Amino acid sequence: MLGSAVLAVAATVPLTSMAAEVAIPVQKVDPALRARLPQGIVTAGFMTSVNEGSFPPYSVVKSAHELDGASGDLVLALGQLFGVQVRHEAVSGLSAVLSGLKTGRYQLAIGPIGDFPDREKVNDFVDWVQEFVVFGVPKGNPEKISTLESTCGKRIAVMAAGSAEKVMQNQTKLCVSQGKPAINILSYTDQPTSILAVRSNRADAFFSSQAPLTYFVQQSKGQLELSGVGQANGFHDLFQGAVVQKDSPLGPLLVDAIQKLIDNGTYAQIMQKWGLSGNMIKQAGLNLPGKLAAAGGKPTDKPGAK
């Protein structure tokens, strides 16, 4: 059952967003993909995707079992390819999402959720977007927050158990070691509450993924703006995607299904509909940061931007 906290999230996120009036084509069942589904899903006729509340414009929780946004459109298309229904459940916080996947209560979390090598030890990630982490600040940026270094002594909102929280925890240690004031890290379980902290002057900035922050800035009617855009801000290549149990057959299957949506143009239509053209990737992949690290690349090793 959807908790009251998640219902509150749904109520605070307007649905008149960045979405353009785009009709996403209905997908035909792909027999080859369907044949690779676990038999339990085929027999039940559905699979359950878990989310942690609204993360616009990717996911917007409309009701207890209804998801809008780019994630909602994507998982709907995936269900059509597989010939099964995808049901939705919302829980409070990322920890509850990962716990539900571990116990098998849910088959996947469409996300997108930040993919990091440490997380790949216990889950598989099907990466379908690239993200960037920036600051959402009041208009005019009165506290002049534009870099990690400028957060010392400031009140910074983050998503609990996420990668941005880890970055801030590391940064506050650095601040103190340099004789500067510690960061007042304010951790929240959902995006709307985090951005509300900034709008109500309980936080000086919200440090999070650029796509949802862009959404909230557009919804703020001039009260908010972005800062720190175009910088690493503690991250290297940041991929986000769906999450499944470690070594689940759903991992490679979702990679191939999402790639089919990329190849037939549906993925681009979904991303463009929700103003996410800058977050598109050309090739879906399984555990991309871990593979990049193994190849000598430099993905962030910090666990959890969402």
Image: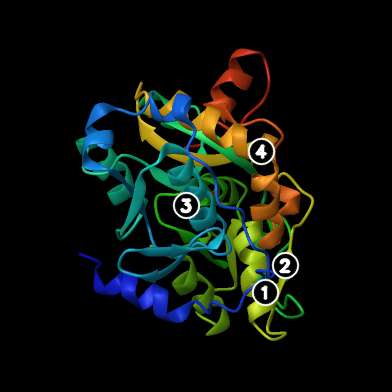
Q: Earlier in the sequence, mark 3 or mark 2?
A: 3
| Callout 4–callout 1 Cβ contact below 8 Å | no
Q: Mark 3 points at which residue?
A: 76
State the image coordinates of residue 245 (x, y, percent, origin top left).
Answer: 33, 30
Which residue has dot 4 on it? 262
Mark 1: secondary structure = helix
Query: Which residue is at a point 31% across and 60% down the rendered structure image?
Result: 92
- Residue at label 1? 217
The residue type indicated by label 4 comes to: Ile
Whole-percent x, y for residue 69 in the image: 54, 62
Q: Is mark 4 on a helix, strand or loop?
A: helix
Task: Tell me if residue 265 can be seen.
Answer: yes
Could you give the CA–CA distance between mark 4 and mark 1, rounded to whole angstroms?
Answer: 28 Å
Q: Can residue 131 be seen in this view?
A: no
Secondary element at image label 2: strand
Q: Label 2: which residue? A: 226
In the image, what residue occupies the spot 37% across and 23% down? 249
Task: Describe residue 59's horizontal placement relative to residue 45 as left or right.
Answer: right
Q: Which is nearer the N-term, disc 4 or disc 1?
A: 1
Question: How far apart are the alpha carbons under marks 3 and 2?
Answer: 31 Å
**Of the image marks 3 and 1, the number of the one nearer the N terminus:** 3
> Crowding at label 1, few (<14), some or many (≥20) Cα neighbours within 10 Å?
some
Mark 3 surroundings: few (<14), some (14-19) or many (≥20) residues within 10 A: many
Q: Label 3, label 1: how many angstroms apart (C-alpha)?
A: 27 Å
